[in-house]
Image: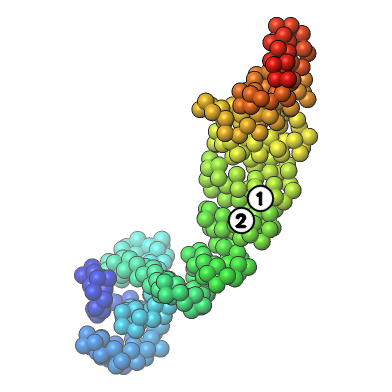
Amino acid sequence: MRDSKKILLIVGIILVFVTTLLIASQNLSVQGKKNLRSANMHLGGKRYEKAMPLYEEVLAENPDQLDALNNVAAIYYDTKKDYPKAREYFIRLIDVINGIYAEYESINETDEKAGKKFFKDNIKKPKLNELLESCEQFRDNCFTQMVNSGKIKIQSEEYNEAIEIFSNIAEIVPDSTITYRLIALCYEKLDDMENSRNFFIKTAELDSTDMYAKQQVAILYFNEENYIEAGNWYMEAAKNDPENPDNYYNAGIAFNNGKKDSLAYDAFKKALEFDLENLNTLVTLSNIALSLKDNDASTIYLQKAVDLDAADGTIDNPIYVTTLCYKFYGLKKYEELIKYAEMWHELESNSKEAVQMLYNASKELNNKELMDKYNKMYQSMQ
């Protein structure tokens, strides 16, 4: 059995399974046995067109006949390349074998001696364990071959034909996510974004761990300007990789575009947890906090952004410094104002506004030394 399995897998030549089973469910009439022998002879001689009708007669008499089921499945798989039909027969064969195992379990529960004899005669001797393993592998190979035929159509850009193949597979194996994902990709290639989105949704519904499908749904909703749904799907994707900031960040952008400030704020805060030095996230949080009328939080986030920007000794975004100074002035945080207004002055040495802000802050702090310093500086600029 192992040799025949190896040949089937590598070369594709079908060998005849000539095991004679003694189990009652495999019984055939005299004519049935004759048909089976003749069919096996034709199969051995590769006369498949003569073998097939005889196997069909055997199965008409006994639908559970293992040899006939196995060899018909093999012909469909290896010769006809009809993988859906081959899979159907392999599944039938698996069900029959499992039924024999179930019969053994039932007998063994009430009579261990009879169960032992049944196992020896009907399972061990005909090597049903090997046959079951082989059938399960070929059942799965049939599915792989079916999917590959659709992939070939995708490679040749025959997307409608590929959709038809994958749709047929989905009817046979309705819980397979790969087929729905590939259908979604085909529709995307055809610029049918609604169907593409719907099949990605189907994929995500069947497999909640499929982050890619969830991200694709989010992207398609975003492109349709359905920002709330896009944000929701990015948050769903984040569940599959909770320490990756990208999904939170994208969700924040989507919610922000959808004018859902609170949702956007929460999403960007999650993104910041896992990417503390993201300047864009800090600035965006500052802006959203301001929209939510939380000026303290807005200032804190912008301060962190400026500090991050200045960490390498240069300021790439001077507007952040200017804005931060006005925030501190409005909050009457004069010590902090002096620190960042000095930074502003370094960036724009001719800015009277920066120097005036420094003078006003030192005056509010009643620091006469600084008042004198900034007053002289201001006078020199007149």
Q: Is residue 353 above or below residue 335?
A: below
Query: In front here: 84 or 64?
Result: 84
Q: Residue beneath label 2, please? A: 218
Q: Is residue 342 above or below residue 272?
A: above
- Residue 176 percent across, percent down from the top left: 49, 65
Q: Residue beneath label 1, please? A: 254
**Amino acid found under the numbered disc labelled 2:** Ala
Identified at 69% across, 47% down, the residue is 256
The count of marks equals: 2
- Residue 218 percent across, percent down from the top left: 61, 56
Query: In front here: 10 or 272?
Result: 272
Is residue 327 shown to the viewer in this render? yes
- Label 1 or label 2, whichever comes before in sequence order: 2
Q: 10 Å neighbourhood of mark 1: few (<14), some, or many (≥20)?
A: many
- 28 vs 359, left or right, is left
- Residue 118 percent across, percent down from the top left: 32, 68
Q: 10 Å neighbourhood of mark 2: few (<14), some, or many (≥20)?
A: many
Quadrant of the snapshot with the C terminus? top right
Q: Tell whether label 2 touches label 1 (CB within 8 Å).
A: yes
Q: CA distance from mark 1 to mark 2?
A: 9 Å
On residue 357, the disc is none
Identified at 70% across, 31% down, the residue is 323
**Amino acid found under the numbered disc labelled 1:** Ala
- 211 vs 220, left or right, is left
- Residue 268 percent across, percent down from the top left: 63, 40
Q: Is residue 142 above or below residue 322?
A: below
Dot 2 falls on a residue whose secondary structure is helix
Query: In front here: 306 or 53?
Result: 306
Dot 1 falls on a residue whose secondary structure is helix
